[in-house]
Amino acid sequence: MAGKLHTFMAVAATAALLAACGNEGAGEKEATKETVKIEHHASSNVIAAHKDLNQKPVPLKMERIGPHDVKIEMTAQVTDIEIDKGKIYKAWTFNGQAPGPLIVVNEGDTLHFTLKNMDPSLPHSMDFHAVHASPSKDFADVMPNKSGTFTYPANNPGVFMYHCGTKPVLAHIANGMHGMIIVKPKNGYPTDKEVDREFVLIQNEWYKYNDMDDFQNGVPSYVVFSAKALKAGDRNTNGDTFTLKEKPLVAKVGDKVRIYILNVGPNEVSSFHVVGTVLDDVYIDGNPNNHLKGLQTVMLPASGGAVVEFTVTRPGTYPIVTHQFNHAQKGAVAILKVTETGEDDGTETSGH
């Protein structure tokens, strides 16, 4: 373990030496709310340059600059995230969120992407699963306090993962550098007219802080859900054990609900399940060609996504879980509250 940590620190030092030589997301305030300073999960593994660093989240910048061209600017930074009550993780993030902000583009768009790296000690990069690219060039490292711009097409519709692709990739993903990009189908989904409400959920794991041995050989300390905002006013949270239980998602009796769901891992499979209903329509990886009907559970590998749709017929509390209940026990439960009005009636929720 000491040897691995020494190697990792050497990589960080080399990156720092090389650096010396060489539309705000809706609901962002919820995802980036300040918390009291609490002792870190395992502060001994905090990189020296990160020790007292808690960078204020920089808003995502997104602008459509043509009918099929989108300009995106994201920021790599180090920001404290509360992952469990009283547990602060000094996360490596995109834009101060973990998972990072939701990106939504259209099938056939060209992405003009800029990554700014505010991390003073480590290089970072971007690997979009939604594009065709040359990884060695288009997903290249951006050195500390530098920026890089890359261009690539998004020609396949679906729900895709993005993540930092800098070595060791596992460390960058496990420490918080992951998120979702939705590429909206050119012709939509066949069920679009039936859908009443849409939500975005991401499942991720947290391990011992910046501990490569635990990342590789251990089991997650927490498995969690976050919600990301599709439009202004939507929920936008970080990946933690409590927020989506204490402040549930809400729907109305009779609503057909659509969830864009992604498992960013980095290691575990998700068995996505909504208690109290059946998944009427499922689009694996969010591609309209991959249409399944009447599923109870959707298997999502690490980096696997889907669009799932279901109808809520009675008022009450509908837990959203991974049906691998050892992971649900570690936090991977969100609550959908269904009421006659479609608003939170203030009643107590129950969960798994």
Image (cartoon, rainbow, N blue to C red):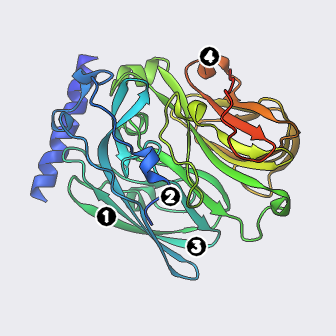
Of residues 10 and 63, the one drawn nearer to the viewer in this rendering? 63
Which residue is denoted by mark 2 in the rendering?
A: 26
Going by the numbered disc 1, the residue's amino acid type is: Gly
Going by the numbered disc 3, the residue's amino acid type is: Asp
Q: Residue at x 37, y 23 (%)?
A: 86
Of residues 302 and 59, the one drawn nearer to the viewer in this rendering? 59
Q: Does dot 2 land on a helix, a strand or a loop?
A: loop
Mark 1 or mark 3: name the one nearer the start of the chain.
3
Number of on-image labels: 4
Q: Does dot 3 land on a helix, a strand or a loop?
A: strand
Do labels 2 and 1 touch, CB within 8 Å? no
Going by the numbered disc 4, the residue's amino acid type is: Asn
**Residues under labels 1 and 3: Cα distance?**
20 Å
Identify whether 109 is placed above or below 134: below
Identify whether 103 is placed above or below 13: below
Q: Residue at x 70, y 53 (%)?
A: 198
Residue 283 in view (yes/no): no
Which residue is denoted by mark 3 in the rendering?
A: 109
Mark 3 or mark 2: name the one nearer the start of the chain.
2
At which x and y percent is residue 318?
Answer: 75, 32
